[in-house]
């Protein structure tokens, strides 16, 4: 009966979880004040829930009495909770079991062993075999400088196998643990990119995730790359801004490429540093019976940068969630020019709460940009579109996979250790007959050079091969203001309102 009681109480606690405020909130939202409704529909729901719990209690009692083998009550408890969350049909809502809780907590500290990618995976219960995105792992973004990034894995890539093991019917946690691998043990991922399928072999290593990187580039441009939005990112960013201003920064670039998001309060705090008092930053809408009020977040005028200082945002398909909140806030308030490619499109928010020794990550709100735009599953189109995600042929991807399994990069680095544009161009020329596209060869060698340097010696930005950044610098150097740019856009037809550059 003790086991029956444990599982029954777990179900009761789960059923009443919305009656308590979250103990851990990874995303800023109004304080949750959950309560019961007096409506007849709520009463019917309560009755139905009571009947379900009673039936499940009886079922467990029957199994405990009659099932031939020993019952793992912890495993059953985790399965029941997971099934309840999975039944919501939301890929952003999931349960972290007590077994995985420590690993989950370690990841949130920003230091762990792995290959350095952020990923998502639809629950196996919702597989559509005609849609690979429902059964493969989707790379949201690679972590800068990590093994995956150095090998050229990018946002939007899909992983089908790990060391030859199919991961289609694994949940996100199972797939994540397998993909992470172990230190000093090679791991081979099967990557699906468009119509191409190829293998990449990586060596997991200790990953440390700073939240920002900064520097002065190209004639007094203050460049800050925001790698993630954690609780400390806002303070780190303000410190970076102050330091760059003291060094003579006359404009600012915020690089949000491959930033999957994080804490919303941090993103809004950064937006607040650029937007005058009283302007809308974001609107959130909650479920009516949650008793959370729809909220309009506005700026408080705590400016860190003068309103006349030009600001450019760099975005791509890995720019998601809190990154899109910051992008929408600055763009809709005419405070920044957005350069890059279409963003990810995540317009919903989650609470992460401690529960039964693990964690629940639950979608609780929809958010809208200041103009009222719903970007969920759509994303944000930049003002200046610069596409760099080139599609390669199957033959080129086969050549790429074979190339990575050789020691060409390491051999070249050993023979030509100096990081120069000339050495990178020479590498691409030397290996052009391998079948790997020349642009890809340049990027691979550039990555190898950069990440072979000590962290404090790495260049903060690449003005030789980073096409999106180069385009953004050109715009700033032209001296055009955001107001002038907007006027130019108004005179163009809708079909040509954005400037488009495609790398070939």
Image (cartoon, grey):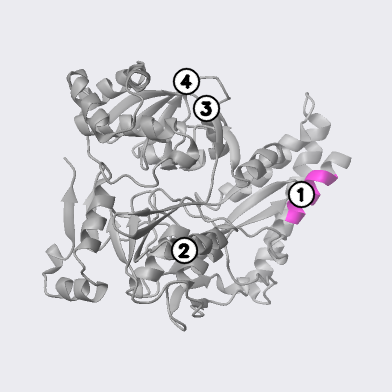
Q: Residues within 10 Å of mark 3 (few under 14, many from 20)?
A: many
Q: CA distance from mark 1 to mark 3?
A: 37 Å
| Image vertical order of residue 430 relative to residue 26, above or below | above
Q: Main secondary structure of the magenta part?
A: helix
Indicate which disc, 3 or 4, sits on the residue closer to the N terminus.
Answer: 4
Q: Is residue 51 magenta?
A: no
Q: Residues within 10 Å of mark 4 (few under 14, many from 20)?
A: some
Find disc 4 in the rendering and name its residue.
Answer: 163
At which x and y percent is residue 324?
Answer: 41, 60
Instruction: Name which residue lies at 63% across and 46% down.
Output: 109
The label on residue 127 is: none
Instruction: Name which residue lies at 28% across and 24% down.
Output: 400
Find disc 2 in the rendering and name its residue.
Answer: 241
Quarter of the image with the C terminus is top left
Q: CA distance from mark 3 to mark 2?
A: 34 Å
Q: Is residue 188 left or right of residue 351?
A: left
Which residues make up the magenta segment?
5-13
At which x and y percent is residue 102?
Answer: 69, 40
Viewer-proximal residue among 43 and 405: 405
Q: Secondary structure at mark 1?
A: helix
Do the residues under discs 2 and 4 have CB atoms within 8 angstroms? Answer: no
Instruction: Name which residue lies at 45% across and 64% down.
Output: 246
Find disc 3 in the rendering and name its residue.
Answer: 204
Indicate which disc, 2 or 1, sits on the residue closer to the N terminus.
Answer: 1
Indicate which disc, 1 or 3, sits on the residue closer to the N terminus.
Answer: 1
Q: Secondary structure at mark 2?
A: helix
Find disc 1 in the rendering and name its residue.
Answer: 10
Q: From the viewer's perspective, is the residue at label 3 or at label 2 nearer? A: 2
């Amino acid at each position: 009966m003790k086991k029956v009681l444990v599982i029954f109480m777990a179900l009761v606690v789960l059923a009443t979880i919305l009656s308590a405020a979250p103990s851990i909130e990874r995303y800023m939202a109004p304080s949750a004040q959950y309560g019961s409704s007096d409506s007849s529909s709520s009463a019917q729901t309560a009755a139905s829930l009571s009947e379900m719990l009673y039936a499940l209690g009886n079922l467990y009692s029957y199994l405990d009495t009659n099932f031939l083998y020993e019952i793992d009550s912890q495993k059953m408890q985790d399965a029941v909770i997971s099934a309840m969350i999975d039944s919501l049909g939301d890929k952003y809502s999931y349960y972290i079991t007590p077994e995985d809780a420590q690993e989950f907590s370690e990841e949130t500290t920003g230091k762990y062993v792995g290959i350095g990618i952020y990923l998502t995976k639809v629950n196996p219960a919702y597989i559509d075999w005609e849609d690979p995105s429902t059964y493969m792992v989707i790379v949201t973004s690679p972590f800068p400088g990590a093994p995956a990034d150095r090998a050229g894995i990018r946002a939007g890539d899909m992983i089908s196998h790990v060391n030859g093991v199919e991961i289609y019917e694994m949940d996100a946690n199972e797939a994540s643990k397998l993909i992470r691998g172990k230190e000093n043990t090679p791991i081979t991922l099967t990557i699906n990119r468009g119509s191409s399928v190829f293998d990449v072999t990586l060596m997991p290593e200790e990953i440390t995730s700073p939240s920002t990187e900064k520097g002065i580039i190209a004639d007094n441009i203050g460049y800050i790359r925001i790698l993630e939005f954690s609780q400390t990112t806002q303070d780190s960013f303000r410190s970076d801004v102050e330091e760059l201003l003291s060094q003579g920064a006359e404009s600012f670039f915020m690089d949000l490429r491959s930033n999957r998001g994080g804490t919303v309060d941090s993103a809004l705090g950064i937006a607040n540093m650029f937007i005058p008092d009283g302007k809308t930053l974001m609107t959130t809408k909650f479920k009516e019976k949650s008793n959370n009020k729809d909220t309009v977040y506005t700026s408080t005028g705590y400016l860190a940068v003068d309103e006349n200082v030009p600001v450019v945002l760099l975005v791509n398909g890995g720019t998601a969630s809190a990154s899109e909140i910051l992008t929408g806030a600055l763009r809709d308030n005419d405070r920044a020019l957005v350069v890059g490619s279409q963003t990810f499109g995540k317009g919903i928010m989650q609470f992460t709460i401690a529960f039964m020794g693990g964690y629940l990550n639950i979608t609780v709100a929809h958010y809208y940009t200041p103009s009222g735009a719903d970007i969920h599953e759509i994303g944000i189109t930049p003002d200046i579109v610069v596409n760099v995600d080139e599609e390669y042929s199957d033959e080129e991807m086969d050549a790429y996979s074979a190339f990575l399994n050789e020691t060409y990069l390491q051999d070249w680095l050993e023979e030509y250790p100096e990081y120069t544009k000339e050495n990178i161009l020479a590498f691409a020329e030397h290996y052009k007959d391998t079948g790997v596209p020349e642009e890809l060869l340049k990027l691979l060698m550039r990555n190898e050079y950069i990440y072979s340097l000590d962290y404090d010696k790495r260049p903060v930005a690449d003005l030789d091969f980073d096409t999106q950044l180069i385009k953004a610098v050109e715009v700033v150097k032209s001296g055009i203001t955001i107001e002038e740019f907007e006027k130019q856009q108004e005179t163009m037809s809708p079909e040509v309102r954005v400037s488009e550059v495609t790398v070939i």
